[in-house]
Amino acid sequence: MLETPVFQAYCGEAPPRFANAAELECAKVLDFYGLPWQYEPRTFVLEEDAEGRTIEAFTPDFYLPEQDLYVEITMMKQSLVTRKNRKLRKLRDRYPDVNVKLFYKRDVARLAERFKLPIAS
Amino acid sequence: MYLAAEEIQARVRELGARIARDYEGREPLLVAALKSSIVFLSDLSRAIPILHAIDFIELAGFGADAALGGTSGIRLLKDLDSELEGRDVILVEDVVDTGLTLRFLCKTFELRRPRSLAAATLLDRPYRRLVDDLPVCYVGFVVPDELFAGYGFDVEEKHRNLPDLHVIREI
């Protein structure tokens, strides 16, 4: 089970419940630098059926309100991120005013190296 | 080798000339964050043919406090010796990546009411930026997603003295 530190720059309502260690460590980095952040504050509907029921949605991991930027962290291998890239394209098509950035495993690994994060790459 | 010393020096000379033009008639203060940017700072300073001052700041790395719980904020290990109020300040960075460190420094320095605040960076990775509203006015090289050593960049405190910039796997 992941630890749940007391964050200083977290500006969401409910305490964040991270899906994995990479998300937790990225949250710690944002918090360390005092950059306000939220965790999964919004789910974007990507596709609905004829009755208006959601059949595909996307919930980016972080939202940085000062930057108006959503950030999605993925620890999948580069060869396996096709589905996530496709979702991101759909999100950008459907919500062109929404800024979203995908941090790939390699990006997270670079962060981990730079900040000496305990994330297995 | 990624960048030869001659290429770096040529680019630093260009940046120095630009800064001299932009700050003509003023006396900017160049501020470098220890340690990786000291080589760039010393070359850049010598490439700026107008009066200017230099100063240093040192930040506690993320890892040091993370061991204590990870949620304590960034803090200064060494503050500036100079007053910033009314000064033209140029932050000198080794690399701007996510922009988190530079954002912290800008926020900290803005409270001290400088006349102007700009940043010069040797290397830039704009594609990984999380913070965009930064005054990065002078960029040496936009670089790919590699780790570097030499020209001030270290591998466990080694290789900072190499005159060229190397991708780490080559060393």
Image (cartoon, coloured by chain):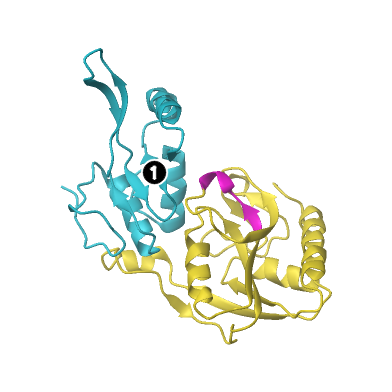
Chain colours: A cyan, B yellow
Looking at the rendering, which quadrant does residue B68 occupy? bottom left
Give the residue at x 29% y 27%.
A57
Q: Position of residue B155 (x, y in %)?
A: 54, 58
Residue type marked 1? Tyr
Q: Position of residue B105 (x, y in %)?
A: 51, 69
- Looking at the image, the residue that sits furthest to the top is A50
Side of B150 relative to A42 (left or right): right
Q: Position of residue B6 (x, y in %)?
A: 81, 55
In the rendered view, tell whether residue B168 sits above or below residue B122. above
In the rendered view, tell whether residue B74 sits above or below residue B5. below
Side of B45 relative to A27 (left or right): right
Give the residue at x 19% y 47%.
A17
Task: Check the residue under mark 1 and report the chain it is in.
Answer: A
* Mark 1 nearby-residue class (10 Å; few <14, some 14–19, many ≥20): many
Residue B60 in sight in this render: yes
Give the residue at x 36% y 37%.
A75
Q: Is residue B125 rendered magenta in the image?
A: yes
**Along the viewing direction, whichever of A35 and B143 lies nearer the viewer:** A35
**Quadrant in which the C terminus of chain A appears:** top left
Give the residue at x 31% y 21%.
A47
Magenta segment, which residues? B122-128
Side of A7 relative to B41 (left or right): left
Please give the residue where the numbered disc 1 appears in the rendered image.
A70
In the rendered view, tell whether residue B82 sits above or below residue A97. below
Task: Label 1, secondary structure: give it.
Answer: strand
